[in-house]
Amino acid sequence: MPIKLLDDHKLNFDGLFTFEMANNHQGDVEHGKRIIREIAAGVRQAGVRGAIKLQFRDLDTFVHPDYRQNTDNKHIQRFLSTRLSSEQFAELVSEIRAQGMLTMCTPFDEPSVDLLERLEIDILKIGSCSAKDWPLLERAAKSRKPIIVSTGGLSMKDVDNLVSFLDHRYAHYAIMHCVAIYPTPMEKLQLNHIERLRQRYPQATIGFSTHEDPNNFDAIKMAYAKGARVFERHVGVPTDTITLNAYSSTPQQIAYWLAAYREAVAAMGPDDARVIESEESRDLLTLQRGIFAKRSIKAGEEIARDDVFFAFPIQSGQLSSGRWRSGLIADRDYPANAAIADAILSPVPSKREIIYQAIHEMKGMLNDAKIALSTEFSMELSHHYGIERFQEVGTTIIDCINREYCKKILIQLPGQQHPYHHHRKKEESFQVLSGELYVELEGRRRVLYSGDILVVQRGVKHRFWSETGAIFEEISSTHFNDDSIYDDPAINALPREARKTKLINWGRHQFD
């Protein structure tokens, strides 16, 4: 029987919708249950995961006794007038569960965390106003509940402190972009901040806690496009005597809001590589130009640019204008105006084509990883079984410094491996900068993720590869040519120049 890990219970925040009831229950349990039922029905109809969120305050201690009658602060009388007992909150929690929803609560003080635990609430929420309340945060972290925290009004320095606090306490958390203006005008939503949070805290799910006009169904689409994956909205049900505030949604508005989310998910598509539909390719092909013979061309004759012209429409099996290369050899006789067949191209790419393609792919990987290179470096492609197999066996080495110490940046293309070898003189260490790198040392395999470091002592046999592509830094003692001894004697037998291609100019594709 496989071992069940202790953290397997962690909540998947991705795709979670939280519906904030706040004080919209108006202190009326039955009205609160109505809100829960109507929102839950919409959630089931939309086919999403939802949580109903309550707010807990121990009002006997939360509000200072000298301010119980105060009317200057608009919140005091609202909190006191909508008071529910712990037994009444328990009724709401039971209704939430009966409707198939997750339970969630924002505690505003430590006794409220105690109540949250007694009621076995699923998720703990920290509101923006409490995101720097360290005593409350300490108590919340001790609950071991999944935590969602809003960051309205917080500077990036504040968020850094908050994330560090939660990380050090092994909290399982998500971070919500939030603008604490009620309601939030469109021009103040600052949705670009979602992307910044994603880049700065890649270990956390990033979300969007919304306070815009309930009829705004565009903001959620943009937030999803920016990377938000957990969402929060204030909800309520109006009656003849109850009017909702300007940022709370009715069940019907929530239905439109969730429909907008589904449209955004469909429009954005998968997170990985773009899918090229066959219909798309066929339609574009009908608009391309083909290559035609300008004059009569004999089989075996080298075709120059002046011997052909490009024209629309392209014919079936014809070479497109985008695949033109100087020096093509005619595979048959072509009369004037005849379509040049795509079979004229060799199925085996040339050395130049292999290197060009590799350069373009590696530049894309470096850009994705935000790794910048200066203009002062040398670079070589190692192809241990020939350039023809470079995409399968090889690596790219960027030499940065080679003195008493040495620094290199190595790039493994997706699916590329570097063969078993060892060094007689050099000791080296690897630090992965991007992607996942598999390393085998003397038969023992390890997987290294971004940030991981591995030391390879001299004389230790090792090899490495990556399934999805990886960039890693090598720091070592001085590099010496021919210091790599390979397990395969066929590689050792090759002269260095036969298994290395040095790039003279990275930007202009010059190579030796």
Image: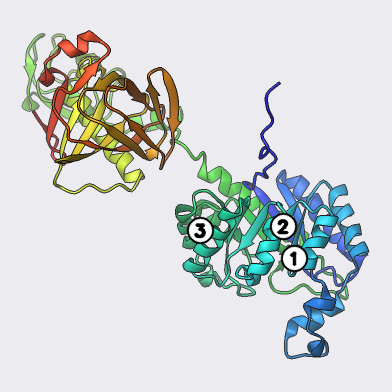
Left or right placement of residue 481 versus residue 264 in this view: left
Local crowd at mark 1 within 10 Å, few (<14), some, or many (≥20)?
Answer: many
The label shown at residue 107 is 1
Disc 2/disc 1 C-alpha distance (Å): 8 Å
Q: Which residue is mark 2?
A: 124
Q: Which residue is mark 3?
A: 194
Q: Is residue 36 above or below residue 278?
A: below
Q: Secondary structure at mark 1?
A: strand
- Residue 391 at x, y percent in the picture: 29, 22
Disc 2/disc 3 C-alpha distance (Å): 21 Å
Q: Amino acid at mark 1?
A: Pro
Q: Is residue 5 above or below residue 155?
A: above
Q: Count how many numbered circles sit on residues in the image.
A: 3
At horizontal 77% and vertical 72% (from top left) the residue drawn is 244
- Residue 23 at x, y percent in the picture: 80, 71
Mark 2 or 3: in front is 2
Q: Secondary structure at mark 3?
A: helix
- Residue 471 at x, y percent in the picture: 33, 37
